[in-house]
Amino acid sequence: MTWDNLPSLYPVLVLALGMLVVLVAGLTRAGQRRETRLILFIGMATLALAGVAGAGLSGATEISGLFRSDAFSRFVLFFGLISTALTLVLANNSREVAGRRMAEFTAIILALCTGLFLMSAAKDLLMAYLAMELVSLSSYILTGFRRADRLSHEAALKYVIYGGVASGVMVFGMSLLYGLTGTTSFSGISKALTGASTVAGAGQVGELAVVVAGVFVFAGFCFKIAAVPFHQWCPDVYQGAPTPFTGFLSVAPKAAGFALILRFLADIFPATGAHEAKWPLVTLLGIISAVTMTLGNFTALHQLNVKRLLAYSSIAHAGYMLMGVIVLDTDGSAAVILYLIVYLFMNLGAFAIIQLVSDSSGSSDLPAFTGLGTRAPLLAVFMGVFLFSLAGLPPLAGFIGKFYLFAALLKSNQFWFIILAVIGILNSVVALFYYVRILREMFLRAPAGEAPAAPAVPAVVMAVLALLVVPTLIFGVYWEPIRSLAVYAASALNLM
Amino acid sequence: MSFSNDILTLMLFLAACAGLVGFMLAFSAILGPKKQSAIKDEPFECGIANVTPYSGNFSVKFYLIALLFLLFDIEIAFLFPWATIFKSLGLFGFIEMFVFLAVVVSGLVYAWKKGALEWD
């Protein structure tokens, strides 16, 4: 490696340094209020600096064949920075995490943010694995962050066990890929699979072997995006984790997981001369997509806890986004990226409202939302916007996200893709039902006993909510900027 | 064609595995002698009967110390190879190692300040 490529690593270095500074700053003996303010300031400054460092980059640079900084990975960098910044502000105003231990929360979430960028920039199995572990380990810690809460402990333990098994299976698949091809770099694997490698004795690798290795690797990837059958951790973890972090968890690591899947598929199976194992694997992902959204939506119908309900809804959304992945062209990937952008706003928003409600009433069960429309009309209306957007109703941003996903599938004009799109559309109808259930609870019902106090909304949180609501509304009618951003990021993947 | 052949081989292999396991379990259940006694039902370790029932908690401090030990042990493991080729690495290696040490030391400061090194 030469020094010329160093700038593309600046965001990582800034985030890592910021994390250390936050940890040490958390040791000061200043008053609690001043300390949390200092921590928040350092955290935000780190994120802003990393953003500046990222914005200064252009084109594509590759470092040691491990790490590639291009439009695609920079998109994930900014995605991670924005969601981390919003989460930090929300966490600072949350009853569940704010206080003395804000320094640890900030430091670990900065580490997580670094991992997100590295996941999307990985060009090598080793790098991909390390980045995924960085994200996973930080997530385990933050899930169990509420020390006094048993649910939080249980969630963290379940997450660690499921996560350990999933990453073990994934590493096994990676070792198979390495054994088959003799290299860990994505592009090297792609060459070796089709026999185009210059390594002595290399020939076409058998289809079944690649499919088996691919299935194992995708077990780990599907765990990260919470796709069936690796979704069982999701409801428990989402319910047990502190609410601001649940919102983050449902958005940022999922986006990085999709980024890694897209990068992996685009590199291992290039547009021309891909190995024949491409289609069995893509078919499998298609089936996973259909099962994921159906199972997610139908299980969400019966949930009584809103966090748990949104966990199943986020499983269903992973299914929708997988539809865009399997098309494996620039249109499909751009649709996934567009959906991720929209999803960031609507899902973080919904969880922010849940945080406010559960902080004031002490529960995130459905009855806590009863009569919210009269207690806190503005919050209820915001929640309505987020939920309708999640359901994919026009003229909200969620509709545009879904529209481009279905369009990418229909444009490919293949029988099974169209069947999948139909399954997706039917699922959206089912999804509407459980989102409306929350709305009915908020607007049409009066609380049975004494109504809980109306949530107190600090001005900062209101600003964050406005930052989330406005794009959800605007991108529904004027989506050209995010559409061209998505196409720009997706075109860095060298798909068709 | 070769794909379905491969699948067939795999399926045969799986069937053989399952068959072998089923065979061994079934026959040991059918043919094995069964003489139950109270002693046989007792839990034991290495053939030695338990002296006391397991109870009591381990202090979490043991884990904490072990974890810190591991951390700084690995730091040393990184320092040895660096020391052997210190001269050929030159100034770059020197600065690089001090960056690494600074990171580890800030960890030590953190552990110290948080009271992880105090036993009581």
Image (cartoon, rainbow, N blue to C red):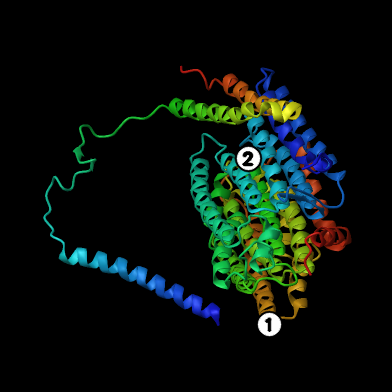
* Chain letter behind tag 2: A
> In the visual, does A79 lie left or right of A287?
right
Disc on the earlier residue, 2 or 1: 2
**Quarter holding the N terminus of chain A?**
top right
* Chain letter behind tag 1: A
The amino acid sitting under disc 2 is: Asp
Vertical order, B29 against B56 (above or below): below
Picture residue at 77% right of the left edge, 61% below the top: A493
Vertical order, A394 against A95 (above or below): below
Vertical order, A37 against A372 (above or below): above
User: Dot 1, crowdedness within 10 Å: few (<14), some or many (≥20)?
Assistant: few
Q: Residue tagged by mark 2?
A: A359
Residue A69 is situated, as x and y percent measured from the top left of the image, at 79, 50
The amino acid sitting under disc 1 is: Phe
> In the visual, does B11 lie left or right of A266?
left
User: Considering depth in this image, is A451 or A398 the residue closer to the camera?
Assistant: A398
Q: Residue tagged by mark 1?
A: A415
- Mark yes or no: residue A381 visible: no
Mark linked to residue B89 = none
Residue A452 is situated, as x and y percent measured from the top left of the image, at 61, 42
- Mark 2–mark 1 Cα distance, whole angstroms, equals 49 Å
